[in-house]
Amino acid sequence: MGTVYCAFSEVHAQIDLERAIALSEALFEDASWGVVLVDVDLRPTVVNAHAARALGGGRTSMLGRPLGELIAQGVEELEGALQHVLAEGAPDAPAELWVTLRGGEGTRRRCWRSGFLRLASPLTEEPVPLGAGWVFQDVTDARLAAQEADRLRFRSNQLHRASRSAAECEDPMEAAMASLDFALAGFADHALVDLMAGERLVRAAATPADAPGPCLPVAGGGIPLRYAPGHPALQAVDRTGSVRTSAGADRTDGEWARRRQWPPDAVHALSTVLRSRGRTLGVVTFLRSSHRAAFERPDAMYAESVAARVAASVDLHQLGGPAAP
Protein backbone atom coordinates (compact mmCIF):
# COMPACT_ATOMS: atom_id res chain seq x y z
CA MET A 1 0.00 0.00 0.00
CA GLY A 2 2.89 2.33 0.70
CA THR A 3 4.20 1.98 -2.85
CA VAL A 4 0.76 2.60 -4.31
CA TYR A 5 0.36 5.74 -2.16
CA CYS A 6 3.67 7.19 -3.33
CA ALA A 7 2.86 6.57 -6.94
CA PHE A 8 -0.56 8.15 -6.46
CA SER A 9 1.03 11.14 -4.73
CA GLU A 10 3.60 11.60 -7.50
CA VAL A 11 0.86 11.57 -10.15
CA HIS A 12 -1.09 14.25 -8.36
CA ALA A 13 2.05 16.29 -7.77
CA GLN A 14 2.75 16.13 -11.50
CA ILE A 15 -0.82 17.19 -12.30
CA ASP A 16 -0.64 20.09 -9.81
CA LEU A 17 2.63 21.23 -11.39
CA GLU A 18 1.13 21.07 -14.87
CA ARG A 19 -1.93 23.01 -13.73
CA ALA A 20 0.25 25.69 -12.16
CA ILE A 21 2.29 26.02 -15.35
CA ALA A 22 -0.88 26.11 -17.49
CA LEU A 23 -2.40 28.80 -15.25
CA SER A 24 0.77 30.85 -15.45
CA GLU A 25 0.84 30.58 -19.24
CA ALA A 26 -2.83 31.57 -19.50
CA LEU A 27 -2.39 34.59 -17.22
CA PHE A 28 0.54 35.87 -19.21
CA GLU A 29 -0.91 35.26 -22.66
CA ASP A 30 -4.71 35.27 -22.82
CA ALA A 31 -5.96 37.00 -19.67
CA SER A 32 -8.44 39.86 -20.05
CA TRP A 33 -6.84 41.72 -17.13
CA GLY A 34 -3.35 43.01 -16.54
CA VAL A 35 -0.81 40.95 -14.63
CA VAL A 36 2.54 42.37 -13.54
CA LEU A 37 5.16 40.71 -11.35
CA VAL A 38 7.62 43.03 -9.61
CA ASP A 39 10.79 42.20 -7.69
CA VAL A 40 11.60 43.42 -4.19
CA ASP A 41 12.90 46.67 -5.75
CA LEU A 42 9.44 47.23 -7.31
CA ARG A 43 10.69 46.83 -10.88
CA PRO A 44 8.62 44.75 -13.33
CA THR A 45 10.06 41.30 -14.01
CA VAL A 46 7.16 39.79 -15.98
CA VAL A 47 4.34 41.65 -17.78
CA ASN A 48 1.46 40.03 -19.62
CA ALA A 49 0.16 41.28 -22.96
CA HIS A 50 -2.88 43.04 -21.48
CA ALA A 51 -0.78 44.95 -18.93
CA ALA A 52 1.74 45.95 -21.60
CA ARG A 53 -1.03 47.50 -23.70
CA ALA A 54 -2.52 49.25 -20.67
CA LEU A 55 0.84 50.69 -19.61
CA GLY A 56 1.66 51.76 -23.16
CA GLY A 57 4.84 49.75 -23.65
CA GLY A 58 6.21 46.45 -24.82
CA ARG A 59 6.31 43.30 -22.70
CA THR A 60 10.12 43.30 -22.68
CA SER A 61 10.92 47.00 -23.00
CA MET A 62 9.43 47.87 -19.59
CA LEU A 63 11.15 45.08 -17.67
CA GLY A 64 13.51 46.31 -14.97
CA ARG A 65 12.42 49.94 -15.35
CA PRO A 66 11.13 51.98 -12.38
CA LEU A 67 7.34 52.29 -12.36
CA GLY A 68 7.77 56.07 -12.32
CA GLU A 69 9.01 55.89 -15.91
CA LEU A 70 5.63 54.46 -16.95
CA ILE A 71 3.26 56.33 -14.62
CA ALA A 72 3.33 60.13 -14.27
CA GLN A 73 0.87 60.50 -11.38
CA GLY A 74 -0.35 57.93 -8.89
CA VAL A 75 2.93 55.98 -8.81
CA GLU A 76 3.38 56.77 -5.10
CA GLU A 77 0.07 55.09 -4.25
CA LEU A 78 0.90 52.06 -6.40
CA GLU A 79 4.39 51.65 -4.96
CA GLY A 80 2.99 52.13 -1.46
CA ALA A 81 0.53 49.30 -2.04
CA LEU A 82 3.29 47.02 -3.35
CA GLN A 83 5.55 47.85 -0.40
CA HIS A 84 2.71 47.02 2.00
CA VAL A 85 2.19 43.67 0.27
CA LEU A 86 5.89 42.80 0.54
CA ALA A 87 5.95 43.75 4.21
CA GLU A 88 2.53 42.66 5.47
CA GLY A 89 0.97 40.44 2.83
CA ALA A 90 -1.97 40.85 0.48
CA PRO A 91 -4.81 43.23 1.43
CA ASP A 92 -8.27 41.87 2.15
CA ALA A 93 -9.99 43.51 -0.82
CA PRO A 94 -9.11 45.02 -4.21
CA ALA A 95 -8.32 48.74 -4.41
CA GLU A 96 -9.09 51.29 -7.09
CA LEU A 97 -6.08 53.36 -8.13
CA TRP A 98 -6.23 56.46 -10.33
CA VAL A 99 -3.06 56.88 -12.37
CA THR A 100 -1.88 59.15 -15.15
CA LEU A 101 0.23 57.32 -17.71
CA ARG A 102 3.12 58.68 -19.68
CA GLY A 103 3.00 58.19 -23.43
CA GLY A 104 3.76 59.57 -26.85
CA GLU A 105 0.32 61.20 -27.05
CA GLY A 106 0.70 63.04 -23.75
CA THR A 107 -0.73 61.76 -20.49
CA ARG A 108 -3.74 59.48 -20.01
CA ARG A 109 -5.67 59.24 -16.75
CA ARG A 110 -6.99 55.77 -15.91
CA CYS A 111 -8.68 54.01 -12.99
CA TRP A 112 -7.49 50.45 -12.31
CA ARG A 113 -9.21 48.05 -9.95
CA SER A 114 -6.20 46.29 -8.47
CA GLY A 115 -5.46 43.18 -6.44
CA PHE A 116 -2.08 42.30 -4.96
CA LEU A 117 -0.28 39.10 -3.92
CA ARG A 118 2.98 38.47 -2.12
CA LEU A 119 5.17 35.94 -3.92
CA ALA A 120 7.36 33.58 -1.92
CA SER A 121 9.51 30.62 -2.98
CA PRO A 122 7.85 27.22 -2.36
CA LEU A 123 11.25 25.52 -2.42
CA THR A 124 12.48 26.63 1.00
CA GLU A 125 11.24 25.93 4.51
CA GLU A 126 11.23 29.63 5.41
CA PRO A 127 9.32 31.81 2.88
CA VAL A 128 11.75 33.78 0.76
CA PRO A 129 10.15 36.88 -0.82
CA LEU A 130 10.39 36.88 -4.59
CA GLY A 131 8.41 40.05 -5.11
CA ALA A 132 4.75 40.88 -5.56
CA GLY A 133 2.04 40.19 -8.09
CA TRP A 134 -0.24 43.00 -9.28
CA VAL A 135 -3.48 42.10 -11.09
CA PHE A 136 -5.67 44.90 -12.44
CA GLN A 137 -8.66 45.72 -14.63
CA ASP A 138 -9.41 49.06 -16.26
CA VAL A 139 -12.67 50.46 -14.82
CA THR A 140 -12.16 54.04 -16.02
CA ASP A 141 -15.28 54.25 -18.19
CA ALA A 142 -17.52 52.92 -15.43
CA ARG A 143 -16.06 55.28 -12.82
CA LEU A 144 -16.27 58.32 -15.10
CA ALA A 145 -19.88 57.46 -15.92
CA ALA A 146 -20.67 57.19 -12.21
CA GLN A 147 -18.94 60.50 -11.50
CA GLU A 148 -20.86 62.19 -14.31
CA ALA A 149 -24.15 60.79 -13.02
CA ASP A 150 -23.34 62.10 -9.53
CA ARG A 151 -22.41 65.48 -10.98
CA LEU A 152 -25.63 65.75 -12.99
CA ARG A 153 -27.69 64.69 -9.98
CA PHE A 154 -26.02 67.29 -7.78
CA ARG A 155 -26.42 70.07 -10.34
CA SER A 156 -30.07 69.19 -10.92
CA ASN A 157 -30.64 69.41 -7.17
CA GLN A 158 -28.87 72.78 -7.06
CA LEU A 159 -31.08 74.15 -9.84
CA HIS A 160 -34.15 72.90 -7.98
CA ARG A 161 -33.00 74.52 -4.74
CA ALA A 162 -32.22 77.75 -6.58
CA SER A 163 -35.74 77.85 -8.03
CA ARG A 164 -37.28 77.38 -4.59
CA SER A 165 -35.06 80.06 -3.09
CA ALA A 166 -35.74 82.53 -5.92
CA ALA A 167 -39.48 82.03 -5.47
CA GLU A 168 -39.17 83.49 -1.97
CA CYS A 169 -37.40 86.68 -3.16
CA GLU A 170 -39.46 89.84 -3.61
CA ASP A 171 -36.64 91.61 -5.48
CA PRO A 172 -35.83 89.97 -8.85
CA MET A 173 -32.16 90.96 -8.53
CA GLU A 174 -32.01 89.14 -5.21
CA ALA A 175 -33.47 86.10 -6.98
CA ALA A 176 -30.74 86.35 -9.64
CA MET A 177 -28.04 86.42 -6.94
CA ALA A 178 -29.61 83.40 -5.22
CA SER A 179 -29.44 81.43 -8.48
CA LEU A 180 -25.75 82.25 -8.82
CA ASP A 181 -24.96 81.33 -5.23
CA PHE A 182 -26.47 77.87 -5.64
CA ALA A 183 -24.67 77.43 -8.98
CA LEU A 184 -21.26 78.21 -7.48
CA ALA A 185 -21.30 75.23 -5.09
CA GLY A 186 -18.84 72.67 -6.43
CA PHE A 187 -18.70 74.50 -9.76
CA ALA A 188 -16.62 77.69 -9.57
CA ASP A 189 -14.85 80.02 -7.14
CA HIS A 190 -16.13 83.36 -8.44
CA ALA A 191 -19.07 84.74 -10.42
CA LEU A 192 -19.29 88.15 -12.11
CA VAL A 193 -22.38 89.72 -13.67
CA ASP A 194 -21.86 92.40 -16.34
CA LEU A 195 -24.98 94.03 -17.77
CA MET A 196 -25.39 95.96 -20.99
CA ALA A 197 -25.51 99.77 -20.72
CA GLY A 198 -25.87 100.91 -24.29
CA GLU A 199 -22.90 99.42 -26.12
CA ARG A 200 -20.83 98.89 -22.98
CA LEU A 201 -20.79 96.33 -20.21
CA VAL A 202 -21.17 97.48 -16.60
CA ARG A 203 -20.26 95.39 -13.55
CA ALA A 204 -23.56 94.82 -11.73
CA ALA A 205 -22.72 92.06 -9.23
CA ALA A 206 -19.77 89.95 -8.11
CA THR A 207 -18.51 87.56 -5.49
CA PRO A 208 -15.67 88.84 -3.24
CA ALA A 209 -12.34 88.89 -5.04
CA ASP A 210 -10.21 87.90 -2.03
CA ALA A 211 -12.36 85.42 -0.11
CA PRO A 212 -15.31 83.07 -0.57
CA GLY A 213 -18.66 84.75 -0.32
CA PRO A 214 -22.07 85.30 -1.91
CA CYS A 215 -22.63 87.11 -5.18
CA LEU A 216 -23.85 90.62 -4.33
CA PRO A 217 -24.78 93.73 -6.34
CA VAL A 218 -21.96 96.23 -6.77
CA ALA A 219 -22.44 99.03 -4.24
CA GLY A 220 -23.26 102.44 -5.68
CA GLY A 221 -23.89 101.24 -9.21
CA GLY A 222 -21.49 99.86 -11.76
CA ILE A 223 -18.81 101.60 -13.79
CA PRO A 224 -18.42 100.87 -17.53
CA LEU A 225 -15.76 98.22 -17.98
CA ARG A 226 -12.79 98.85 -20.26
CA TYR A 227 -12.55 95.34 -21.65
CA ALA A 228 -9.92 94.93 -24.35
CA PRO A 229 -11.01 93.58 -27.75
CA GLY A 230 -11.27 89.81 -27.65
CA HIS A 231 -12.21 89.70 -23.98
CA PRO A 232 -14.21 86.48 -23.27
CA ALA A 233 -17.22 88.48 -22.03
CA LEU A 234 -17.28 90.48 -25.26
CA GLN A 235 -16.89 87.28 -27.28
CA ALA A 236 -19.87 85.75 -25.44
CA VAL A 237 -21.99 88.79 -26.39
CA ASP A 238 -20.86 88.65 -30.02
CA ARG A 239 -21.48 84.90 -30.29
CA THR A 240 -24.68 84.94 -28.21
CA GLY A 241 -23.32 81.90 -26.43
CA SER A 242 -20.56 80.67 -24.15
CA VAL A 243 -16.78 81.12 -24.25
CA ARG A 244 -14.25 79.03 -22.29
CA THR A 245 -10.64 80.05 -21.72
CA SER A 246 -7.68 79.25 -19.46
CA ALA A 247 -4.45 80.94 -18.49
CA GLY A 248 -2.25 78.07 -19.63
CA ALA A 249 1.35 78.51 -18.54
CA ASP A 250 0.77 82.22 -17.79
CA ARG A 251 -0.90 81.64 -14.43
CA THR A 252 1.65 82.13 -11.67
CA ASP A 253 1.55 85.86 -10.91
CA GLY A 254 -2.12 86.63 -11.58
CA GLU A 255 -1.35 89.02 -14.43
CA TRP A 256 -3.47 86.99 -16.87
CA ALA A 257 -6.52 87.52 -14.65
CA ARG A 258 -5.80 91.16 -13.83
CA ARG A 259 -5.58 92.07 -17.53
CA ARG A 260 -9.13 90.78 -17.87
CA GLN A 261 -10.30 92.56 -14.69
CA TRP A 262 -10.87 89.31 -12.81
CA PRO A 263 -9.74 88.23 -9.32
CA PRO A 264 -6.00 87.45 -9.41
CA ASP A 265 -6.40 83.76 -8.47
CA ALA A 266 -8.53 83.02 -11.57
CA VAL A 267 -6.93 80.68 -14.14
CA HIS A 268 -10.04 79.23 -15.85
CA ALA A 269 -13.04 81.23 -17.10
CA LEU A 270 -16.45 80.53 -18.61
CA SER A 271 -18.45 83.51 -19.90
CA THR A 272 -22.11 82.93 -20.81
CA VAL A 273 -24.46 85.46 -22.37
CA LEU A 274 -27.62 86.53 -20.52
CA ARG A 275 -30.61 86.45 -22.89
CA SER A 276 -34.30 87.15 -22.24
CA ARG A 277 -37.18 87.90 -24.61
CA GLY A 278 -34.83 87.87 -27.58
CA ARG A 279 -32.51 90.50 -26.08
CA THR A 280 -28.95 90.33 -24.77
CA LEU A 281 -28.93 91.68 -21.22
CA GLY A 282 -25.30 91.02 -20.36
CA VAL A 283 -22.86 88.29 -19.42
CA VAL A 284 -22.22 86.09 -16.39
CA THR A 285 -18.64 84.87 -15.97
CA PHE A 286 -17.68 81.93 -13.78
CA LEU A 287 -14.05 81.69 -12.65
CA ARG A 288 -11.98 78.85 -11.24
CA SER A 289 -8.64 78.98 -9.46
CA SER A 290 -5.73 76.62 -10.04
CA HIS A 291 -7.02 73.88 -7.71
CA ARG A 292 -9.87 73.16 -10.13
CA ALA A 293 -9.83 71.74 -13.65
CA ALA A 294 -10.57 73.81 -16.73
CA PHE A 295 -14.20 74.24 -17.80
CA GLU A 296 -15.47 71.67 -20.29
CA ARG A 297 -18.48 71.50 -22.60
CA PRO A 298 -20.82 69.93 -19.96
CA ASP A 299 -19.88 72.83 -17.66
CA ALA A 300 -20.91 75.31 -20.36
CA MET A 301 -24.29 73.58 -20.70
CA TYR A 302 -24.86 73.86 -16.95
CA ALA A 303 -23.78 77.52 -16.96
CA GLU A 304 -26.25 78.24 -19.77
CA SER A 305 -29.07 76.73 -17.68
CA VAL A 306 -28.10 78.96 -14.77
CA ALA A 307 -27.76 81.99 -17.07
CA ALA A 308 -31.30 81.51 -18.40
CA ARG A 309 -32.67 81.77 -14.85
CA VAL A 310 -30.48 84.72 -13.99
CA ALA A 311 -31.46 86.52 -17.20
CA ALA A 312 -35.18 86.07 -16.49
CA SER A 313 -34.76 87.63 -13.04
CA VAL A 314 -32.58 90.48 -14.35
CA ASP A 315 -35.17 91.19 -17.04
CA LEU A 316 -37.91 91.44 -14.39
CA HIS A 317 -35.69 93.70 -12.31
CA GLN A 318 -35.19 96.05 -15.24
CA LEU A 319 -38.96 96.06 -15.86
CA GLY A 320 -39.56 96.81 -12.21
CA GLY A 321 -41.58 93.64 -11.58
CA PRO A 322 -41.60 91.10 -8.74
CA ALA A 323 -39.33 88.07 -8.72
CA ALA A 324 -40.38 85.10 -10.83
CA PRO A 325 -41.04 81.79 -9.06
Image (cartoon, rainbow, N blue to C red):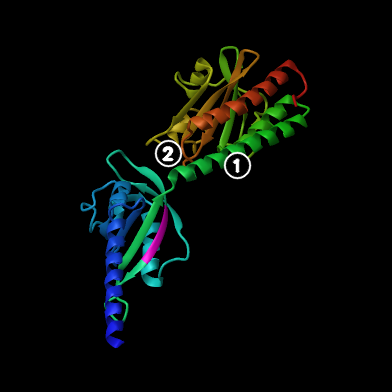
Residue at x-position 71% and y-position 29%: 175
Residue 228 in picture, x, y percent from top left = 46, 20
Which disc number belongs to residue 284?
Answer: none
**x, y percentage for residue 114?**
41, 56
In screen coordinates, is 288 left or right of 162? Answer: left
Q: Is residue 276 above or below residue 136?
A: above
Q: Position of residue 236 (x, y in %)?
A: 51, 20
Instruction: Report x, y in % for residue 136.
Output: 38, 54
Magenta highlight on residue 116? yes
Which sits in the foreground, 215 or 311?
A: 311
Residue 25 visible in the snapshot: yes
Q: Which residue is mark 1?
A: 212
Q: Element type at marker 1?
A: loop
Quadrant including the N terminus: bottom left
Give the residues drawn in magenta, as a range: 113-117
> Would residue 226 be visible to someone looking at this image?
no
In the image, residue 294 lies in the stretch drawn in magenta: no
258 horizontally vs 315: left or right: left
Residues 27 and 320: in front is 27
> 305 or 273: which is nearer to us?
305
188 in relation to 1, above or below:
above
Q: Which residue is mark 2?
A: 253
Establish if 261 lies above or below 60: above
What amino acid is labelled 1 in the image? Answer: Pro
